[in-house]
Image (tube, grey):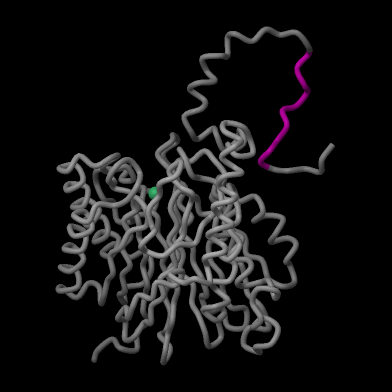
Amino acid sequence: MAGENKKITISVIKADIGSLAGHHKVHPDTMAAAARVLAEGKRKGLIIDFYVTHVGDDLQLIMTHRKGVDHPDIHGLAWDAFKKATEVAKDLGLYAAGQDLLSDAFSGNIRGMGPGVAEMEFTERKSDPIVVFMADKTEPGAFNLPIFRIFADPFNTAGLVIDPRLHEGFKFEIMDVYEGKIVTLNAPEELYDILALIGTTGRYVIKRVYRKSDDEIAAVVSTERLNLIAGRYVGKDDPVAIVRAQSGFPAVGEILEPFAFPHLVAGWMRGSHYGPLMPVSMRDAKCTRFDGPPRVVALGFQITKGRLIGPADLFDDPAFDEPRRLAQLITDYMRRHGPFMPHRLGPEEMEYTTLPEVLEKLKNRFKQVEQPAKKEPSTIVTKEAE
Ligand SMILES: [Mg+2]
């Protein structure tokens, strides 16, 4: 068959185009509308295969094709699917219908228009497993800790120590989402430099990971930050990620392992609170308590001649019951802080929420009683504590 040797591209494109009962979950009719558009794209030969799903209020389009990343036809197809789904959402009066579509007209690339995008292109192996992570009520930096542990922490990934194909390590492409700049750092040589950046999860986000020995793509994360694009609060930028597994990459079990620790992530209620990232099955991929807690699903696929074989619902397993229970305990503990930090986000993150409008009202009530401090403390670029 023509084109069989050409590289395959996996595109995961997501958007919140409106949901059922507040920010709880995507309505099945909107998924059906999106699936019809993608089925037509498949019939025309634009895409090879697709899978439409949701996590919480985010509609997820998983597609395979041979057109490479950032292709206008593929992005256009996803845009059409979101538009059709939005029409249904508006007809049903779903909450925040069309929320993530920041523009009316498609301009060739869906990046910067609201939806989140994770895409990678590679030569298909004889047997090619991938894991697609999709999270709701959090931000792209939520994947920093698990992606770091998968590709750089030998206490997580045994293969880094004992598998010669992983032993050389991986390269991390890290994005400063405020400045729009990228830096590439090597693990294990520059571990501490990597951590110095990615510990600031709201600013420095792991965008891609490459295998160092041959520059082969290993992982990609959506890094869109909707609030920074829109300049106002328009919901959290619930992220997606694609991670390649086995035969020269970490095993599926090594890829899932970091999620056994429900680490604190920014997002949750009104995109303004820290809470535990709870790994859940598709059945529980919907947010309730305080619009959360933030959750993540993992779908496993085999890519076979471009077809998406699967998915396997990887967190649908009692092995993740204890992390889920721990996440509930953390949820209780964090919730008891109410509107106080560190449950509520810090001031630099709150700038992109609705809080500044409230603070504006109080501005003229302040009276100067002492000399102001010489310099406002910077919480974004952290210097040594003084
Ligand atoms: Mg969402």
331 or 250, nearer to the observer: 331
125 or 323, nearer to the observer: 323
Q: Where does residue 47 sit, x and y in percent of width and height?
A: 25, 73
Would residue 334 be found to the left or right of residue 191 on screen?
left
Q: Where does residue 80 sit, x and y in percent of width and height?
A: 21, 56
Eyeballing the image, is 230 above or below 144? above
Residue sitting at x 38%, y 68%: 69
Q: Where does residue 160 sit, x and y in percent of width and height?
A: 67, 81
Q: Which residues are magenta?
A: 371-380
Residue sitting at x 45%, y 47%: 292
375 or 281, nearer to the observer: 281
The answer to if 372 sits in the magenta stretch is yes
221 or 229, nearer to the observer: 221
Main secondary structure of the magenta stretch: loop
The answer to if 375 sits in the magenta stretch is yes
Eyeballing the image, is 105 above or below 306? above
Q: Where does residue 265 sit, x and y in percent of width and height?
A: 57, 50
Would residue 281 be found to the left or right of residue 247 on screen?
left
Residue sitting at x 40%, y 49%: 287
Q: Quadrant of the C terminus?
A: top right
Q: Quadrant of the N terminus?
A: bottom left
Res 183 → quadrant: bottom right
* Number of disc labels: 0
Would residue 76 be found to the left or right of residue 177 on screen?
left
Would residue 164 be found to the left or right of residue 67 on screen?
right
Eyeballing the image, is 256 above or below 289? below
